[in-house]
Structure formats: structure tokens, C-alpha cells
Image (spheres, rainbow, N blue to C red):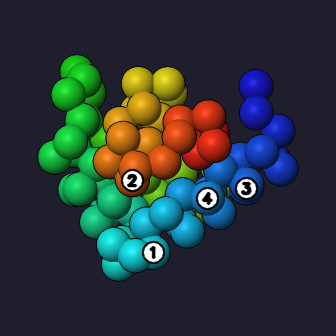
Amino acid sequence: MPTPKEKAAFAKRLKDSLEPLKIRGGTKLAEQFNLRYRGDRSVTPQTAHKWLTGTTIPKPDKLRTLADWLNVKEHWLH
């Protein structure tokens, strides 16, 4: 289970990666993420907000989609 420090570090890396795309909020992140995600369950704005605030870290399949979209290494993002 990730520690609060790990979650905060993930959130910072995610925000930094989204900055050039001008994506700052959970709603926009969820919209853009769901266009790219091929899994069973889409992401709600609330879940995306939790990623941005460091409350949670995405599951591996969603993390992989984020990393591919943002053109970063999955390991680095996590």
C-alpha cells in the first residue's frame, strides 16, 4: 500500500506531466483519460481529482494508460 509521501509524489509527477497539456482539474483529466482508456470502467472526475490531490494512485492498467498518453515511463510516474 502506497504511503502518503508516495501518493503526494505521484500527484506532483502527474500534475507536472499534465501542465503542458493545460489540464489542471479532475473533470478535464477524466474526459481526456477516458478517450484513451480501453478498460471496462471509465474514470469519474472524482477519481481523477483523487489522483491529482495524492489521495490515491491508479491501478496498474490505468497507470499504464496515463504513462502511454503522457509519454513517460510507467515506473517513473508511479
Kind of residue sitting beneath label 1 = Glu
The earlier-in-sequence mark between 2 and 3 is 3
Q: Residues within 10 Å of mark 3 (few under 14, many from 20)?
A: some
- The picture quadrant where one finds residue 61 is top left
Kind of residue sitting beneath label 4 = Arg
Reading the image, the residue beneath label 1 is 19
Residue lying at 76% horizontally and 25% vertically, measured from the top left = 1
The vertical placement of 19 against 58, above or below, is below
Q: Are marks 3 and 4 in contact (CB under 8 Å)?
A: no
Residue 3 position within the rendered picture, expressed as x and y whole percent measured from the top left: 82, 39
Reading the image, the residue beneath label 3 is 8
Mark 1 vs mark 3, CA separation in Å: 16 Å
Circle 3 sits in a helix, a strand or a loop, which is it?
A: helix
Circle 1 sits in a helix, a strand or a loop, which is it?
A: helix
Q: 46 or 10: nearer the eye?
A: 10
Q: Is residue 3 left or right of residue 74?
A: right
Residue 54 position within the rendered picture, expressed as x and y whole percent measured from the top left: 65, 54
